[in-house]
Amino acid sequence: MTITSIISAIGNNRSIYPLLLRDCGIEVPSKIYITRKENQKESKQKANDATREKFIDEYATSAVWLGGIPLVEYFADKFIKKRGFNPKFNIKLFKEDKFQGVEKNISKFKNSAPEAVKELEKIKNNKKIYEKLIAGKFCAATLIPIALMGFVLPKLNFALTRSIKDKRKIQEKFKPAQSDITTFGQRKNIDVSFNGNWISNIANLKTVDKMAITDGGLTVGRVTTSRNKDEGAVNAFRMLGSMFLNFVAPAYIAKFLDKTANKLFNINVNLDPLIMENKEFIQVIKDNKIELPKSNSAKDLFEFIDSKQDSLFCKLAQSSGKIDYLENGVRNPLQYVDINDLANFKNEFESFIKSAQKSKNIDRFAKKAKFVKGGNIILNVIISSALLAVALPKAQYKFNKLVTGSYSDPGLKD
């Protein structure tokens, strides 16, 4: 994996990679450190308890949050396949329009993609069953992680703390008056109903969207399982802030940085950096041999992607997840094409080409654009990580102090 592909992955706010980097690599270690530091203002014992709880809570939650949805969906897809259906079918195709839909695709691709059409026909003839399977897959992929993260894990974590505190009290009660001092004068430490429209919407949610939903469920779970009202208030403050900084802020930060770069350097950096460094892409710009759809109309876009599969535009659109082609080069009849997303991709494509052609040196322009875009992505990660890993935990403990009058975690009150 190249540096550019890594930067491209963490710059895609519709994937889990930015979340993985921010959550496990930066946010969690910082939260644990700040938790210990703030609780030490009250006592070393509170700091030990709070650090242990935070460590278990954050890393176990991250494991379920980042891996739970893909794992559940993997087994759900296996189950759907055993029922004889293709789980990769996009349920939006049940809604027919002039250019795509189940009936339209069956008619259009019956000769060029007969195997895919057979799968389409089976799904069409068992629409209600398929919708229920997809709805069940969504519910399992979100409700199981929510139950584990929001209800099971906190209860187990709290139970461990209670057990340790109970043992500590028993040891304190029966310990001789001087037993806490060793012969060397050192203190001992004891650590111990479904409808088609709803299904169509949820079936097309990306993993990161489902993670946002599970985060909402996690917030409810953490508040309702809190050990007292103060802990519930602090948990609500922390979880709502985390949801905003994880799923809303990065997209706006990215837009701001890209617009700023465009104004400062007169460079369009909305394309993926992997496209900016594509040698074939740079060469066709130099040769002025770019083939593009005539317009952004659905008619022109569909005509182009179905007849110009070997064009660079279609190849890059496929690599960006805008279109899906079968091995024989035919557009996959099971997949829905988001025509608005494809039109926007074409606009960004054209804008970059025009800017590059106006420059004196196209190679230098492309390298500069890739560098600026990479810098924006890294800066976005730094800003959002700083907000998540430092600003939010600091604000949480200020809120905690305001609500409880103490710096220690309110759930650790005796």
Image (cartoon, grey):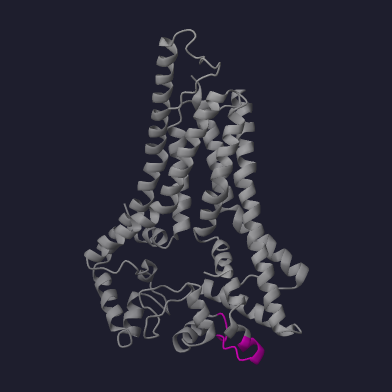
Which contiguous range is marked in magenta? 283-296
Q: Residue furthest front?
A: 183
The majority secondary structure of the magenta stretch comes to loop
Q: Quadrant of residue 379?
A: bottom right
Residue 221 % position (x, y): 43, 38
Q: Quadrant of residue 331?
A: bottom left
Vertical comparison of 203 with 4: above or below? above
For residue 35, side relative to residue 322 (left or right): right
At a point 22% along the width and 64% down the height, the residue shown is 82
Residue 234 % position (x, y): 55, 33
Vertical comparison of 328 with 61: above or below? below
Question: 382 or 45: which is nearer to us?
Answer: 45
Question: 235 or 70: which is nearer to us?
Answer: 70
At a point 41% along the width and 48% down the height, the residue shown is 64
Question: 230 or 109: which is nearer to us?
Answer: 230
Q: Do we see residue 128 in this rendering?
A: no
For residue 250, side relative to residue 100 (left or right): right
Q: Is residue 101 magenta?
A: no
At a point 42% along the width and 40% down the height, the residue shown is 150
